[in-house]
């Protein structure tokens, strides 16, 4: 009985050992296959790093300000009788925008006219009497003073009457009105903003180290949110350097015929210095941005496990310079002529195999034009 049991145990042990050996061989084969496994290549587009000559510029962020811009307010208190403009409309210089109720003022002017006419009549009679030597000079002087005072009172009341009309001091675009017919306005209450949109100022700051290269009259390019690029001229450079930032305020004037720039808008500003320098330029889409550093993927012939050569990518950290449209300057890390991945960057890692397909490539222009522009 015990001999038979021993034989059965021996058979079981041999069986288990055989199964273990087979599994060990399978695991070892799988590990070897894993080490030599190469993921399928990722499809990407590429571009050759080109050496271009870019105009030397000073770049900054500017703010649009109107050449003429005010918020019209009530000069005199009164009730709004008429509103003679539409919100957002263009108005001419001197146009009446709001009329306040002037019934009391008109009555005062009529009374002042009557008093002026009476004083004029008394003065005319006094002139006749003094010519006939029937009036003393002092009495005539009193009549003359009364006439002048009556005329001055009339002018004052007419000025008050005119101040009941709120006029546009310059041609521009009226904003959204804040008053309604029948509303009582106190002196100084706002009525409507008025902005002149052509021309406009663009104010920006440059570091004190760069201000020496700027001159009044230099060309300035400005664009907002990737829209149309406008060209203006520097019209003023502040002679004082800001103590806190060590920047100098610069003002440029832009003709704004299509009213693309609006007061308060932020714009990207570039001042051309009239010189150029060679730069290595790449599409912005080729840059992999990361907190620890920006990088690109360079396509090269790499060697895989077992010495097998394949076409793959190498991650290269770079230093970025100025940007122009779809392009960015690379100041360090990429040499002219190297092939760089321009799309599909997000799915790559260093050493990954790639399949280059440049049938359709992203646009890359230093001066792009929006498709709907």
Image (cartoon, helix red, strand yellow):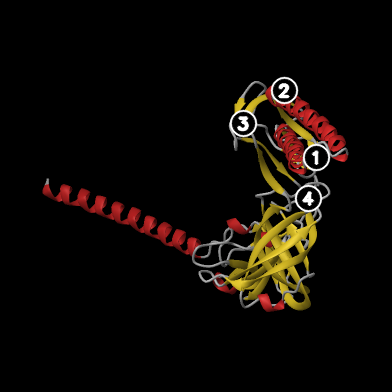
**Residue 282 vs residue 115, the one in the foreground:** 115
Q: Mark 3 points at which residue?
A: 77
Other-residue count near label 4 (Cα within 10 Å), few / some / many at <14 / 14–19 / ≥20: few
Q: Name the residue under label 4.
A: 370
State how far apart marks 3 and 1 are (Cα).
20 Å
- Residue found 57% across the figure and 58% down from its top: 39
Name which of mark 1 and mark 2 comes first in the sequence. 1
Q: Which of marks 3 and 1 is in front?
A: 3
Can residue 93 be seen by looking at this rendering? yes
Other-residue count near label 1 (Cα within 10 Å), few / some / many at <14 / 14–19 / ≥20: few
**Residue 46 vs residue 135, the one in the foreground:** 135
Q: Name the residue under label 1.
A: 94
State how far apart marks 2 and 4 are (Cα).
62 Å
Tag 4–tag 3 contact (CB < 8 Å): no
Q: Position of residue 157 (x, y in %)?
A: 71, 33
Vertical placement of residue 299 versus 225, above or below = below
Q: Position of residue 108 (x, y in %)?
A: 70, 26
Question: Could you tell whether 162 is left or right of 346 in the image?
Answer: right
Q: Which of marks 2 and 3 is in front?
A: 2
Disc marking residue 107: 2
Rendering quarter of residue 124: top right
């Amino acid at each position: 009985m015990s001999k038979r049991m021993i034989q059965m145990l021996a058979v079981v042990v041999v069986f288990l050992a055989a199964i273990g050996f087979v599994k060990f061989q399978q695991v070892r084969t799988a590990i070897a296959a894993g080490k030599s496994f190469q993921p399928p290549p990722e499809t990407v587009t590429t571009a050759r790093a080109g050496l271009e000559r870019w105009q030397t510029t000073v770049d900054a962020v500017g703010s649009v300000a109107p050449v003429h811009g005010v918020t019209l307010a009530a000069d005199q208190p009164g009730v709004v009788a008429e509103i003679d403009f539409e919100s957002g409309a263009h108005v001419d210089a001197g146009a009446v925008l709001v009329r306040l109720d002037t019934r009391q003022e008109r009555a005062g002017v009529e009374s002042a006219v009557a008093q002026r006419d009476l004083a004029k009549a008394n003065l005319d009679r006094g002139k006749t009497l003094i010519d006939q030597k029937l009036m003393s000079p002092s009495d005539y002087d009193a009549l003359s003073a009364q006439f002048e005072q009556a005329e001055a009172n009339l002018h004052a009341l007419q000025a008050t009457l005119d101040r009941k009309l709120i006029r546009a001091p310059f041609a521009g675009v009226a904003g959204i009105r804040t008053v309604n017919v029948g509303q009582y306005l106190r002196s100084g209450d706002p009525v409507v903003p008025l902005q002149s949109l052509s021309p406009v100022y663009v104010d920006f700051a440059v570091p004190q180290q760069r201000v020496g290269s700027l001159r009044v009259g230099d060309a300035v390019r400005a664009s907002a949110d990737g829209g149309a690029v406008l060209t203006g001229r520097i019209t003023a450079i502040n002679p004082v350097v800001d103590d806190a930032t060590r920047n100098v305020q610069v003002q440029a004037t832009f003709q704004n015929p299509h009213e693309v720039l609006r007061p308060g808008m932020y714009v990207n500003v570039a001042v051309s210095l009239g010189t150029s320098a060679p730069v290595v330029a790449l599409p912005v889409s080729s840059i992999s941005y990361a907190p620890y550093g920006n990088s690109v993927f360079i396509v090269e012939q790499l060697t895989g496990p077992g010495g097998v050569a394949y076409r793959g990518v190498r991650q290269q950290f770079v230093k970025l310079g100025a940007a122009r449209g779809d392009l960015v300057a690379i100041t360090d890390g990429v040499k002219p002529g190297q092939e760089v991945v321009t799309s599909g960057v997000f799915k790559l890692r260093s050493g990954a195999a790639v399949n280059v397909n440049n049938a359709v490539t992203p646009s890359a222009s230093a001066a792009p034009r929006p498709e709907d522009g």
